[in-house]
Amino acid sequence: LNIHYKHTHRDKPQYECDECHVIFAIKRELSTHMRIHSGEQPHTCTQCGKQFGTRQLLKKHWMWHTGERSHVCPHCGKAFFQ
């Protein structure tokens, strides 16, 4: 519902991707999204050199190196990356 409201009913300017027509409320989000189409991957893992389009993807990847599992099942205690 929040996404629908932001993209459909906001009075603020909207930014549309020319490639796939996804609409963003914030221009920076469109710029980040455009990396999908351009192939730009400015974030590099210092451990293995793999590159990512966003810091969030790099952070998820980094958990594989550190073994961090911050999501724990409340029923059995098993931990997961996400």
Image (spheres, helix red, strand yellow):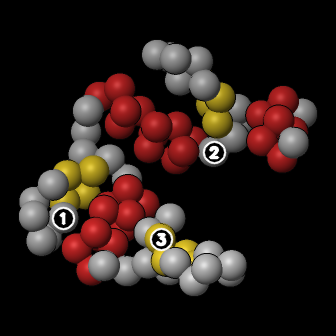
Return the x and y of residue 55 as percentages of the image width and height.
37, 61
Return the x and y of residue 61 as percentages of the image width and height.
30, 62
Tell me the SS state at disc 2: loop
Q: Is residue 55 visible to the viewer in this orientation of the structure?
A: no
The label number, if any, that marks residue 58 in the structure image: none
Amino acid residing under circle 1 = Cys
31 relative position to 1: left or right: left
Q: Residue at 18% across / 64% down in the picture?
A: 45
Task: Give the label, 2 or 3, closer to the camera.
Answer: 3
The single residue placed furthest to the front in the displayed view is 76
Counting residues from the N terminus, which is met first, the one under dot 2 or under dot 3?
Answer: 2
Counting residues from the N terminus, which is met first, the one under dot 1 or under dot 3?
Answer: 1
Amino acid residing under circle 3 = Phe
Q: How many marks?
A: 3
The single residue placed furthest to the left in the displayed view is 48
39 relative position to 11: left or right: left
Q: Which residue is mark 3?
A: 80
Q: Which residue is mark 2?
A: 26
Amino acid residing under circle 2 = Ile
The label number, if any, that marks residue 45 in the structure image: 1
**Cα distance, mark 2 to mark 1?**
27 Å
Return the x and y of residue 23 as percentages of the image width and height.
65, 28
**Cα distance, mark 2 to mark 3?**
31 Å
